[in-house]
Amino acid sequence: MDTKQGILSSVLWTIGASGLPRVVAKRKAGQGGILAFHRVYRSRPHEFGSQSLSTTPENFRRIIQTLVDRRYDFLTMSALADRLLAPEPVQEKFVCLTFDDGYADNYTEAHRICQEFGVPMTVYLVSGFVRRSYPMWPPGLENVLAANRVVEFTWKGRKARFGAHTMAQKRRAYWAITSFLAVAQPREIRRVCAELGRRYGVDFMALTDRNTLTLAMIREMRESGAVEFGAHTVRHLYLSRLTDALARREIVQSKRDCEALVGAEVRHFAYPYGDAGSFGSRELDMCSKVGFRTAVTTDSNTIFASDQNRLLALPRLTYNGRYQSTPLLDLLLSGTLPALRRVLRGRSTSAAVTNALPLAGSGAASDFRGMPPG
Ligand SMILES: [Zn+2]
């Protein structure tokens, strides 16, 4: 655990023990929340991206048991839309369990545990990953940095060079490279992956294959009746940085692709990265026109009745695996961390603290951190 993570973990424990979440919950817990996960997986030390994106199977089971014990309703995104639009309010609190990017452990671990408890999940697929036609680059980048003391590649016609002798240097290099790959154009991402792959002998597509749900897994999950699938674009790009034509293709084509993969209509969407800069009225309009019923962001908040007016920009509560040993679930569902973040964001001098909070929504790199690649 690095120093910053240690300090923040202590802060979260202190807030959790203070009784504050119970007080805050009275006004901020709303009707429930959409939890955003990525992986149910025990990450290894060099898997810098996966550490924040993963919760262990044991912890995931604890989370579900806690929510069952507290009598939460577990909803798919379709059921959530129905509930928000229902004429009569429902008193029971709810959670939606959502998973971004379509990692294989959504089948081997998350689905297995959800099945045990009989609770539904929603999985947002990146169709280019599932089709094995576009690289899911974070695992490849983790492997390149793990095995090398210096990493070099060409970026915008110049040589980029990162020292990676120590674990701390590797981690810093991972997040530095992530911060610009996250917002890069698809041609450039593909080229960097190919160059890193050639130079350091890492097969980015083999890693994509190993880490992504297969068609057989997707079909089995669908046939279980307990998994709803949504679309998460074709190549997991930062939509607001794309031309109109490319952005439309990412949204419209991913709906068609996912429907073909799943064998059913796909009515739900998740914006890659999902922070406020990653999408806007253009993307909302495209989602509406293509017929998505809901779309989720990584804006951190619980759900209130008024969210029926923004079904195409719903907030979520990102579960950051780096803090899974803290009372993170309570701090999220009570609305405490989202509220704290909004308070701190209002004070410019606290920007550094705000950005360090283990919440999604502070930009592209944090999506990888809070998720990832969001
Ligand atoms: Zn994502």
Image (cartoon, helix red, strand yellow):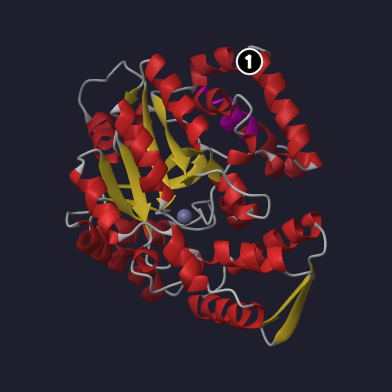
Q: Residue at x 63, y 11 (%)?
A: 19
Q: From this viewpoint, which residue is outermost toward the bottom?
A: 157
Q: Is residue 151 magenta?
A: no
Q: Which residues are magenta?
A: 334-341
Examine the image and state in which quarter residue 17 appears.
top right
Residue 159 against residue 98 in the figure, above or below: below
Q: Left or right: 19 with respect to 104?
A: right
Magenta stretch secondary structure, dominant: helix
Task: Look at label 1 and name its amino acid.
Answer: Leu
Q: Residue at x 69, y 61 (%)?
A: 174
Q: In the image, residue 261 lies at what x, y percent?
A: 24, 61
Q: Left or right: 46 with respect to 169?
A: left
Query: Which residue in the protein does label 1 denote?
Result: 20
Q: Is residue 340 magenta?
A: yes
For mark 1, give the secondary structure: helix
User: Does the Cβ of the disc 1 residue fall within 8 Å of ligand 1?
Assistant: no
Q: Report if residue 294 is visible in the image.
A: yes
